[in-house]
Image: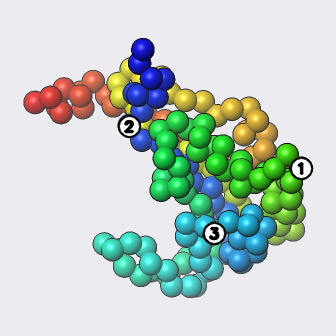
Amino acid sequence: MKSEHSDTRNTYLTFRVVGDLLTPDAVTRALRVVPTVQYAKGETYFAGPRTGELVGKTGLWALTTDKLVASNNLRDHLAYLLGVLIPDRQDANPLFQLHALLAKRPDWRADLSCFWHGRPEAKKPSIPKFVSEVMKFLPAAIEADFATDSPTEREQRRA
């Protein structure tokens, strides 16, 4: 029997909070997790070996799961994020604290970008309703980038 996720080539998500007056440490304290990248507007940050150092045009706090979750199942990546926002059935404080921060600072915005890439004919994943409801509560926009290899790309790889 073929695994449900054997047709997935790559998947990850990025949860971001951005804003010109963003203080990334406030988000880190609320969520109790070290982000993948964070900087305030005007701060210098390392954008990678090819790009080098840049100056932030706006503040950013971002958590990306590509190196944190060893799974091609989007639900595992979403479960990781939910574990950050709601670490325990009795502890939704990180979620409530981030909601309060976003409510007090109208220039801050949150969003969730989900990326999934599969083989041709692979079934694209969906965002569970509970995740949508949590993002709506924050509020945070959800962007889904779900794509499969086109048959043309597959034929080119065979050549």
Where residue 33 sits in the image (x, y, percent)?
A: 68, 66
Which image quadrant for residue 159? top left
Q: Which residue is mark 2?
A: 9
- Label disc, if present, on residue 59 of the rendered structure: none
Q: Which residue is mark 3?
A: 34
Which image quadrant for residue 106? bottom right
Where residue 46 sits in the image (x, y, percent)?
A: 44, 78
Q: Which residue is mark 1?
A: 90
Mark 2 against mark 1, which lies toward the viewer? 1
Of labels 3 and 1, earlier in sequence is 3
The answer to whether the residues at label 3 and label 1 have Cβ atoms under 8 Å apart is no
- The three-letter amino acid code for the residue at tag 2 is Arg
CA gap, disc 2 to disc 3?
27 Å
In this view, which residue lies farthest toward the bottom? 43
Which residue occupies the foreground of this view, 43 or 107?
A: 43
Locate residue 139 relative to residue 63 in the image: left or right: right
Is residue 35 visible from the viewing direction of this image?
yes
Is residue 116 visible from the viewing direction of this image?
no
- Identified at 48% across, 47% down, the residue is 70
Q: Is residue 32 placed above or below 70 in the rendered structure?
A: below
- The three-letter amino acid code for the residue at tag 3 is Val
